[in-house]
Image (tube, grey):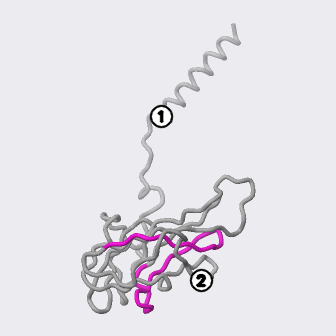
Amino acid sequence: MASWSAALVGVVVLTSVLAGCTGQTRPGVEDTYGGMPSYLATIPSTTDEVLDGSAAHPALTSEGDAVRVHLQDGATVTATVTGPVVPGEGLPHQGETTTCTWTVSLRGTSGSVPVSVSDMTTIDQLGNVYRLSPVPGKGTPPRTLRAGQRVTFELRTVMKVGEGVLRWAPGGGKTLAEWDFEVEND
């Protein structure tokens, strides 16, 4: 009988402890860790808006996001870069480098926009710069995109697995737009 009494007391104690845990509210982040440091930038409420990129203020965004690129002569074009797409995901051997393919879309042109594959490069987390080439059989972009025209093309290079940025410097000048990406082959 004593063992039944001890077991019953144990169940009552455990039940009250668990009930006490679930009845409490969790403290907020502000109450636990303090507020966000003032030196961090405030995240805007409209994070998926089109960014503006210019020589004075190049745009840095994630792959898949659009950038309204402002050229020196006043022309603008909206550029979007997606990728990289890599072959061999899930293969038993994953190399340190892989073939990467990006899709570049240019639209909403307001004037004459120079388009050259040589004006687009990627750079990896170690600072290595990679030259891009058009994907064979997929065509090449026109040399100049006129107002109202649009074009989509694919570019490719072999680069190191890890973090990277695709940069566009129309006309070979300053970089006006950059897209951050991750090269993964696992």
User: Which quarter of the picture shows residue 128?
Assistant: bottom right
On screen, residue 47 above or below 70: above
Question: Which portion, as a residue range, is magenta?
Answer: 150-177
Look at 31% across and 84% down and name the residue there. Answer: 70
- The numbered disc on residue 129 is 2
What is the spatial separation of the Cα atoms under label 1 and label 2, in whole angstroms?
A: 54 Å
Q: Is residue 154 magenta?
A: yes
Q: What residue is rendered at 61% in x and 76% in y?
A: 125
Q: Are marks 1 and 2 in contact (CB under 8 Å)?
A: no
Please provide percent x and percent y for residue 182: 56, 66
Q: Position of residue 98 (x, y in %)?
A: 65, 67
Q: Quadrant of the C terminus?
A: bottom right
Choose between 144 and 80: the one closer to the eye: 144
Residue on which the image places disc 1: 22
Residue depicted at 58% across the width and 70% down the height: 163
Q: Residues within 10 Å of mark 2 (few under 14, many from 20)?
A: some
Residue found at the far top of this picture: 1
Whether residue 176 is visible to the viewer of this picture, yes or no, is yes
Q: State whether residue 72 is above or below residue 159.
A: below
Q: Amino acid at mark 1?
A: Thr
**Number of numbered discs overlaid on the protein picture:** 2
10 over 133 or under it: above or below: above
Task: Left or right? Give the position of 157 relative to 138.
Answer: right
Q: Quadrant of residue 12?
A: top right
Residue 39 position within the rendered picture, expressed as x and y whole percent measured from the top left: 43, 76
Percent coordinates x, y for residue 131 in the rendering: 57, 82
Amino acid carrying mark 2 in the image: Val
**Residue 62 visible in rendering:** no
Per the image, label 1 sits on a secondary structure element best described as helix
**Residue at left offset 41%, top offset 80%:** 177
Q: Main secondary structure of the magenta part?
A: strand
Of the 4 image quadrants, the one containing the N terminus is top right
